[in-house]
């Protein structure tokens, strides 16, 4: 099974841009369901992103890059 | 202990220091109904530096207690709860604010056990944010750990990384004595602060302890000993790695300031004969002088060269970014000090 993880909808402004503040994992690493894989922020409000399934993670955006809400940020296989 | 992560490592759970601290508190709270948290913005906000993140959702307002801005009142209440058998964790938002509540800390928290002839215990953790580097000026950027280590009666722990922070927090909660838990804002791994990559690291999921009063060799070496604490340890490790193949640097992370692990300092300096101390607290009358005395009290002949101290100069913390970094212990200054002590 493969799951795409998107940047969470944190602001009602759909065009709001966030930042991928911190990656806690690297491409190729095994993650477990519920494990924090990233911390993201929009307008200085931050949120943890957890792995929805067990699997191997592939990161799709760089740390500290600006990301639109809803954009895919990682894939877990 | 301070692991450097490589691309080949897989399946490691990493946390920021902030999340590691709150996880340690949560695990102790699940096991022990006597543990509770009190302080300014520790509730729904999760602590302004994230030290109590998520705790309010799990434990609610009766065990994660937001207080008014009245440090004497809520630290005093924590001491009262502790002598009655509770295990409070009280947060003083910035250590710089100690001035308004020092009577509670020094004359009560630190002395009740002694003055009661050992009959009354104060099993309390006073957690507080320290350090600068982000333009918060003279009243919100000090370290001040030596101020608390100076007077008898308090244990003072100063972690440099997520693993030690969780383990020292659990040790502090379980300790029957008052423990000052001082986290540098720069080691918390906060998204809105300057990035210090070593503030994110592997943390075991289970509860574990790191012993209070025990230093750790964060980077083994043979030519020079660099003694440091807190965020400065991260800078020392960067320099030690940059000098690999040129100068063999041993970085000793004290982790606890009181009680000071003098044996580890003596063992390392006996091996290297050269000593650099890196401390973001004020230089005079503080930790760095105490580390030097640890050597000279035993045998000054251990030292092959004069000691170098990279500490905060005896001035208030400037607001200006340029001036602040002129004063802070930086990687450049640490490297210069190591080179000087190697020539000496």
Image: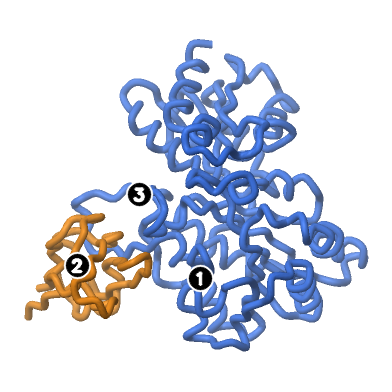
| Quarter residue B281 falls in | top right
Q: Pointer 3: residues within 10 angstroms few (<14), some, or many (20+)?
A: some
SS of the residue under disc 1: helix
Q: Earlier in the sequence, mark 3 or mark 1?
A: 1
User: What residue is drawn where x is 11% and y is 78%?
Assistant: A3
Residue extending furthest toward the left: A1
- Judge by depth and name the residue closer to the eye, B46 or B30: B46
Task: Tell me the CA gap for discs 3 and 1.
Answer: 21 Å
Q: Colour of chain A?
A: orange
Q: Nearer the viewer, mark 2 or mark 3?
A: 3
Disc 1 target residue: B24
Q: Are marks 2 and 3 on the same chain?
A: no
User: What residue is drawn where x is 77% and y is 59%?
Assistant: B100
- Judge by depth and name the residue closer to the eye, B118 or B173: B173
Q: Chain of mark 1?
A: B
Disc 2 target residue: A30
Q: Are marks 2 and 1 on the same chain?
A: no
Q: Pointer 1: residues within 10 angstroms few (<14), some, or many (20+)?
A: many
Q: Nearer the viewer, mark 3 or mark 1?
A: 3
- Judge by depth and name the residue closer to the eye, B47 or B106: B47
Q: Chain of mark 3?
A: B
Q: Is residue B278 above or below residue B260?
A: above
SS of the residue under disc 3: helix
User: What residue is drawn where x is 33% and y is 47%?
Assistant: B4
Q: Where is residue A10 shown, x and y percent of the image?
A: 28, 77
Residue extending furthest toward the top: B344
Q: Where is residue B38 shown, x and y percent of the image?
A: 65, 75
Q: Where is residue B53 shown, x and y percent of the image?
A: 47, 73
Disc 3 target residue: B197
Q: Colour of chain B?
A: blue
Q: Quadrant of the C terminus of chain B?
A: top right
């Amino acid at each position: 099974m493969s799951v795409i993880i998107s940047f969470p909808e944190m602001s009602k402004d759909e065009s709001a841009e966030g930042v991928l503040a911190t990656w806690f994992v690297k491409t190729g690493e095994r993650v477990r369901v519920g494990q924090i894989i990233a911390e993201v922020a929009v307008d200085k409000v931050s949120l943890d992103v957890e792995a929805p399934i067990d699997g191997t993670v592939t990161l799709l955006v760089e740390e500290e890059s600006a990301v639109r809400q809803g954009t895919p940020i990682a894939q877990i296989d | 202990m301070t692991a450097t992560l490589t691309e080949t490592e897989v399946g490691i759970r990493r946390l920021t220091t902030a999340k590691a601290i709150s996880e340690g508190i949560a695990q102790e709270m699940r096991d022990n109904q006597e543990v509770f948290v009190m302080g300014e913005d520790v509730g729904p906000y999760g602590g302004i530096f994230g030290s109590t993140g998520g705790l309010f959702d799990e434990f609610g307002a009766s065990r994660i207690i937001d207080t008014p801005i009245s440090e004497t009142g809520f630290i005093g209440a924590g001491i009262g709860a502790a002598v009655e058998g509770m295990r409070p964790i009280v947060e003083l938002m910035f250590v710089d604010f100690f001035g308004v509540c020092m009577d509670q800390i020094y004359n009560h928290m630190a002395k009740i056990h002694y003055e009661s002839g050992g009959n009354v215990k104060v099993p309390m953790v006073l957690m507080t944010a320290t350090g600068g580097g982000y333009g918060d000026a003279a009243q919100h950027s000090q370290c001040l750990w030596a101020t608390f280590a100076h007077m008898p009666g308090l244990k003072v722990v100063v972690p440099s990384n997520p693993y030690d922070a969780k383990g020292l927090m659990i040790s502090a909660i379980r300790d029957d004595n008052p423990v000052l838990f001082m986290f540098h804002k720069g080691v918390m791994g906060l998204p809105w602060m300057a990035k210090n990559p070593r503030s994110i690291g592997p943390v075991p999921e289970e509860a574990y302890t790191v012993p209070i009063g025990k230093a750790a060799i964060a980077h083994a070496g043979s030519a020079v000993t660099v003694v440091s604490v807190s965020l400065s340890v991260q800078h020392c490790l960067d320099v030690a790695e940059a000098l690999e193949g040129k100068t063999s640097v041993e970085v000793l992370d004290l982790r606890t300031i009181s009680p000071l692990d003098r044996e580890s300092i003596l063992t390392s300096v006996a091996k290297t004969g050269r000593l650099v101390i890196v401390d973001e607290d004020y230089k005079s009358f503080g930790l760095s002088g105490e580390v030097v005395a640890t050597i000279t009290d035993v045998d000054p002949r251990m030292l092959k060269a004069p000691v170098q101290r990279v500490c905060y100069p005896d001035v208030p913390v400037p607001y200006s970014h340029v001036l602040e970094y002129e004063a802070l212990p930086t990687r450049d200054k640490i490297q210069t000090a190591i080179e000087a002590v190697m020539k000496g």
